[in-house]
Amino acid sequence: MTDEIKKGLLGIVVDETTVSQVMPEINSLTYRGYAVQDLCEKCSFEEVAYLILNGNLPNSIQLNKFMKEERTNRNITINLREIITHVPKKAHPMDVVRTVVSVMGLEDKETVDNSPEANMRKAMRILAKTPTALAAFFRARKGKKIIKPKNKLSFSENFFYMCFGKVPQKEIVKAFDVSLILYAEHSFNVSTFTARTITSSLSDIHGAITGAIASLKGPLHGGANEEVMNMIKKIKTPNKAKNWLIDTLNKKQVVMGFGHRVYKSGDSRVPSMKKYFLKVAKIKKDKKLHKIYDILEKEMIERKNIYPNLDFPTGPTYHLMGFDTDFFTPIFVISRITGWSAHIMEQYASNKLIRPLSKYKGSKHRKVMLLNNR
Ligand code: CMC
C-alpha cells in the first residue's frame, strides 16, 4: 500500500471494461471494438445502442426486436406526467431529468430485481421513457400541450416530434442521430464511474443512473455543451471571436468545449460531429456560428495547442436545431443511458465494492468536553 495521492484518480486504472476504449493504433474511441466514426456513417443510434448494451451489432431480426421493445415502452405514467407539469418552470432540465429517472425507479415493477435479465429490461425502459419525460418538460414549461410518443418513428425522429410537433428533414435527423451515437459511451468518465460506484454497493440501476445524471450536470463534464453555446452567445459576432479568446486566455479562464483529460491531441469524435454541424449550418443558412467555431478552433490550437472536444460542435448544432440551451446536456443524458447501463451491468457481473482510502490531515486526537465546559 502506498501513501501517494493521485488527485482526480489521474492515471489510475481502477477496473477492466469491454464496453469502450480509445484504441491507440487507430487513435479513435471505439465501442466494443468499432470506431465511432465508422458507426456514425453506417449505423443508426438504435443499432449502436444495441451494440453497447449487448456487445455485438444486431442483425435485422435482433434490431427489429430491440426497436419494438424501445418503441412499446415509450409511454410514461399519468403520475409522472403530472409531476413534470408541476415542477417549477424555471427548474434546470437536468434536475428534472434526474428527478424523472428517480420517479421511474419508484414506479418500476422490477426495481428490487437486480438480475442481469431484469437490469436489461429496466435499462430498455429507462432508455425508452426518458426522452418522453424530457420532451414533456420541454413543452410543459412553455405552457404547450404535451405530445405523446409515436411508435412509427425512430428514436431521434420521435424526440423531435415530441418536442416540436413535427419531424425535420432527414439530414437534420441524421445529424442528431450522429450526436447521440457520439455521446453514447466514453469509458470511465465521471458520470460512468459514479454509476459504477453506486452499483458497487449493489444498489439498483435507477439509483445509479440518477447519480450519474447529477454527475453529468457539472460544466467540467456534460454541462460543457451548454456553456459552449453561452460562450458563443456572449461573443455574438465572428469579428469579436479572436479578441474575446485572447482576453479570456489572458485572464487565465477556461474556454468551454476545449481540452480533455484523455485526448491531448484532438478528440476523435469531433471530426464526425463537425461534419454534421456544418451540414446543419448550411441547411439553416447560418451566417455566424460556424465562423465563430472556426476562429476559436484555429486560435486555441495555435495559441495553446488545445483541441476542441465533442461539446464544442454539439452545442451550436443543437442550437440551430431549435433546442433550448439548457436542454443540451439532458439530450446527452438520453444517449448516455446506454453507456451507463452497459457499465452498470458489467459492474454487477464482476463486482467489488469501490472504497478508496484517504490520507487524514485533520485535528489530532482530542477529548470531548461536555457542552457547559466548551
Ligand atoms: N481552456 C483554457 N485552458 C485549458 C483548457 C481550456 N478549455 N483546458 C485545459 N487548459 C489548460 C489548463 O489551464 C492547464 O494549463 P496550465 O498547465 O498552464 O495550468 C492545462 O491546459 C492542463 O489542463 P488541466 O485542466 O490540468 O487538464 P485536465 O485533464 O485536468 O482537464 C478538462 C480536462 C476537460 C477538465 C479541461 O480541459 C477543461 O476544463 N475544459 C473545459 C470544460 C470542457 O470543455 N469540458 C468537457 C470535457 S469533454 C466531455 C466529457 O467527457 O465530459
Image: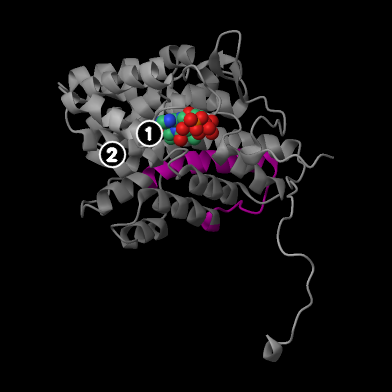
What coloring was used for the rendering? Answer: one colour
Residue, x 56% and y 14% (percent of image)? 34
Residue topped by disc 2: 230
Disc 2 beta carbon < 8 A from ligand 1?
no
Q: Which residue is mark 1?
A: 256
In terms of secondary structure, where does tag 2 sit?
helix
Q: Main secondary structure of the magenta part?
A: helix
- First in sequence, mark 2 or 1: give its number: 2
Q: Image quadrant of residue 245?
A: top left
**Numbered mark located on residue 36 in the image:** none
Residue in the foreground of this view, choosing between 232 and 282:
232
Label 1: few (<14), some (14–19) or many (≥20) C-alpha neighbours in 10 Å: many
- Does residue 168 lie above or below 92 as drawn? above
Specify the quadrant that holds the N terminus: top right
Q: Residue at x 16, y 28 (%)?
A: 237
Query: Spatial distance from mark 2 to mark 1, Cα to Cα?
Result: 9 Å
Q: Quadrant of residue 373?
A: bottom right
Residue type at the position of mark 1: Met
Residue 124 lies in the magenta stretch? yes
The amino acid pointed to by label 2 is Asn
Which residue is nearer to you in this view: 176 or 288?
288
Which residue sits at x=27%, y=53%? 140
- Indicate the position of residue 288 as horizontal and vertical percent values: 17, 24
Q: Would you say residue 25 sits in the magenta stretch?
A: no
Q: Nearer the viewer, residue 209 or 107?
A: 209
Residue 344 seen from this side: no
Q: Are marks 2 and 1 in contact (CB under 8 Å)?
A: yes
Q: Which residues are magenta?
A: 106-133
Q: Is residue 50 visible?
A: yes
